[in-house]
Image: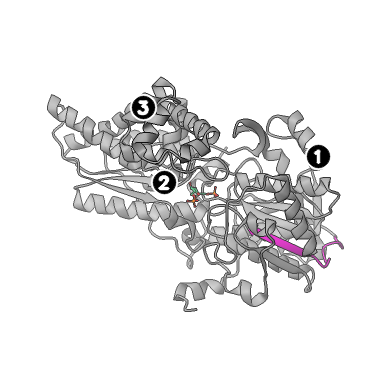
Amino acid sequence: MEISALQKARYAYKPKLPADLSRPLDQIALEFGGATGAVADQDDLRALFTHSYGKPVVKFVSGKNDGLRKLLKAGVILSGGQAPGGHNVIAGIYDGLKKGNKDSVLYGFLGGPSGLIENRSVLITDEFIDRYRNTGGFDIIGSGRTKVETPEQFASSLETAKKLGLDAVVIIGGDDSNTNAALLAEYFLNQGSSIQVIGCPKTIDGDLKNEYIETSFGFDTAVKTYSELIGNIERDANSAKKYWHFIKLMGRSASHITLECALQTQPNVCFISEEVAAKKMSLMEVVDIICSSVVKRAGKGLNFGVVLVPEGLIEFIPEMKVLIEELNDILAANAAEFSQVSSFIEQMYWLGFKLTKASNNLFTSLPPEIAKQLLMDRDPHGNVQVSRIETEKLLMGMCEQRLNEFKKQGSYKGKFATQCHFFGYEGRCAFPSNFDADYCYSLGFSAFMLIASGLSGYISNIRNLVAPADQWIAGGVPLTMMMNMEHRHGSKKPVIKKALVELDGNPFKSFSSRRESWAEETKFVFPGAIQYFGPPEVCDQPTLSLKLEHQR
Ligand code: FBP
């Protein structure tokens, strides 16, 4: 395989570990906190997770420990969407296992959770892992979105783990995948098995976070990659002065990615879905916010600009939310019947009898392409695939219509030429930033520590992330602590609570206090590309969101 000069240089990069994980293993002790609860619905969760609920938070500290040198066999799964740094999590687990005992073994399950269910795995060796150190992507073993939910899937997961003689399974994933990890951990214990299950917080979306998980891995690299691209577009817009750029950004429901990119690049308009929902804004109000900036800037002769749109926005506009929820229920309840309705016109007609009047009016008023996108298959966890809905084009088209009305009324004389972009997949497999390379390796090493300590139902965590890496604090948090009960597919299910943007949090406040001037003036900032080699103030900085969150 031919490799680039950067890849070669990154192979040699030595990820930084917290000082407490860098000691010889017999000098790393465990410090336990008190019993834990859950974020909500404690009674339901205690009843569902009889073996794994309420365990203490654990921290790795300096101290004597003779128990970490066991011969261990573990399996690792990459689950869900790609996120930069996944390879380093595996490297961290692998190096930890080998440091504990050179005969310990790590298997990589192929293609996500289905690799465990169907017993497809590869043995990870020195030579194999060395080809993936500090690189982006999940291509080392692949990923998948299979939800472990049927009794047969649980049983065959246990069967595979037993066949391979595993002591532990590590699931690297987002909220849904770590929910899988919690359920598997409980199931294994319930079956009398000692096979442990450990989670690791992955997702570029940044929505798997709480007091103990300061950020999910991959967010740092993804936002820096998108911010570079947005900055480049801003510079182009400011050079050519002829286009309004509509940029949709990945992130599923939460707007953390969009918020961080806005803080880094200072676009003219940026929506935060959580605010749109809180203010109950209609689609037309969203359009009017953009048009107001276009009109004001045109008045100054500035017929160009940049608009950031989070991909989940569509689901947060109240009337759209109702429509999408109705569609979800109708399509789930009538899947077989709907699959027989072939043309879009017939689908519209069929839905006309099932949707409420208001939702049907909205649905039929949407541009056909957008309406079709709302009908596309849901993912295995029941989520609408927002990455496939062209919200940026919907808004752009509606703005065009609105501005034409203004022109007719004589209140606007500018030009409105547009370009649309979607930045999503571009950021998910980038070479991990130094932050993500270090953070992921530490998460992996910490996962090994949890395994070697005999714990199950925990997620690996690293805290104090705004400090230099040697001051980071490593440990584990019970997965049930992050759970609540939510309505999914028509019934209440235990799930890890998604962390949405907090409107009273520092990142949002910093953005909202400055956005008015960005809307009228040109205050673009050009962050440039991620730097991998150079001074720490250029190469090792965490995101602005993380820094602002720490200023509590
Ligand atoms: P995860 O929650 O699995 O990390 O997925 C992140 C994500 O990139 C979302 O931002 C996006 O909406 C989705 O995956 C796209 O999914 P797919 O890769 O299946 O197109």
Nearer to us: label 2 or label 1: 2
Q: Position of residue 121 (x, y in %)?
A: 67, 66
What's under tag 3, amino acid-wise? Leu
Circle 3 residue: 362
| Residue 97 belongs to the span the image colors magenta | no
Q: Residues within 10 Å of mark 3 (few under 14, many from 20)?
A: few
Question: What segment is highlighted magenta in the picture?
Answer: 65-77
Q: The residue tagged with tag 3: helix, strand or loop?
A: helix
Name the residue nearer the viewer: 345 or 317: 345
Circle 2 residue: 388
Q: From the viewer's perspective, is residue 325 above or below residue 301?
A: above
Q: Position of residue 158 (x, y in %)?
A: 77, 54
Queried on whether the Cβ of the residue with tag 2 lies below 8 angstroms from ligand 1, the answer reads yes
How far, Cα to Cα, is label 3 from label 1?
51 Å
Name the residue nearer the viewer: 222 or 284: 284
Label 2 with label 1: CB-CB less than 8 Å:
no
Q: The residue tagged with tag 1: helix, strand or loop?
A: loop
Question: What residue is shown at x 33% (from left), y 49% (from top)?
Answer: 421
What's under tag 2, amino acid-wise? Arg
Q: State which quarter of the image contains the C terminus.
A: top right
Q: Residues within 10 Å of mark 1 (few under 14, many from 20)?
A: few
Q: Position of residue 258 (x, y in %)?
A: 43, 43
- Quadrant hosting residue 157: bottom right
How far, Cα to Cα, is label 2 from label 1?
44 Å
